[in-house]
Image: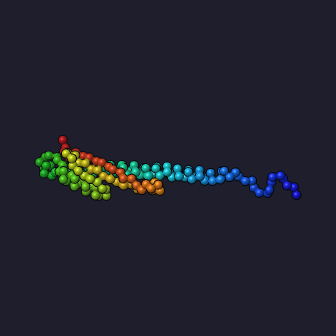
Amino acid sequence: MTRVHGCTGSRPRRPRGDRGSVTVYALAMIVALFTVTGVAVDGSRAAQAAAHANAVASQAARAGGQAIDPAAAIGGGIEVDPAAAVAAAESYLAAAGVYGTVQVLGNRLIVDVQITSGTTFLAIAGIDGFTLDGHGETDLVRS
């Protein structure tokens, strides 16, 4: 039987310093992928919710701005009844299922709303959602 010097019949050993380095790299890449995906998906959902908040606030202000005072309209004038405008805007917000405040400041009807958007991927990092504000205004006096 012939033996080759240094050959023991087993596989050659890898250096111990490289053990697990691919696992750490793969784990880092997976975490980075989830982070980028989370920001992309949940960030776009937050942007859509912000646009929705502004749209609801604007539509509520528009609904309030259409609350014309019937007595003034009969006489030929076009005036918006402030109390009816607030009630119409609040009714619109209630129908939309959105929390908001409606106020009259001078000749302006101002509607501010808050919408909460949940997260999907960022919930893993402890970010459960975003609270987004919307704003809408309209004139109550037609000139």
Q: Position of residue 121 (x, y in %)?
A: 47, 55
Residue at 25% across, 52% down:
102
Residue 70 percent location from the top left of the image: 15, 52
Horizontal arrangement in the rendering, residue 25 relative to residue 64 (left or right):
right
Q: Residue furthest front?
A: 17
Seen as rendered, the residue at the extreme top is 143
- Residue at the right extreme, as displayed: 1
Q: How many marks?
A: 0
Left or right, 67 with reference to 120: left
Tell me if residue 51 can be seen: yes
Task: Work out which quarter of the rendered image holds the N terminus and state it.
Answer: bottom right
Residue pictured at 47% horizontal, 54% vertical: 125
Q: Residue 133: image x %, image y %?
A: 33, 50
- In the rendered image, residue 135, in percent from the top left (x then y), is placed at 30, 48
Does 101 sit left or right of 29 as displayed? left
**Residue at point 26% right, 53% down?**
101
What sort of colour scheme is used for the picture? rainbow
Quadrant housing the C terminus: top left
* Of 8 and 69, the residue lying toward us: 8
Q: Residue furthest left?
A: 75
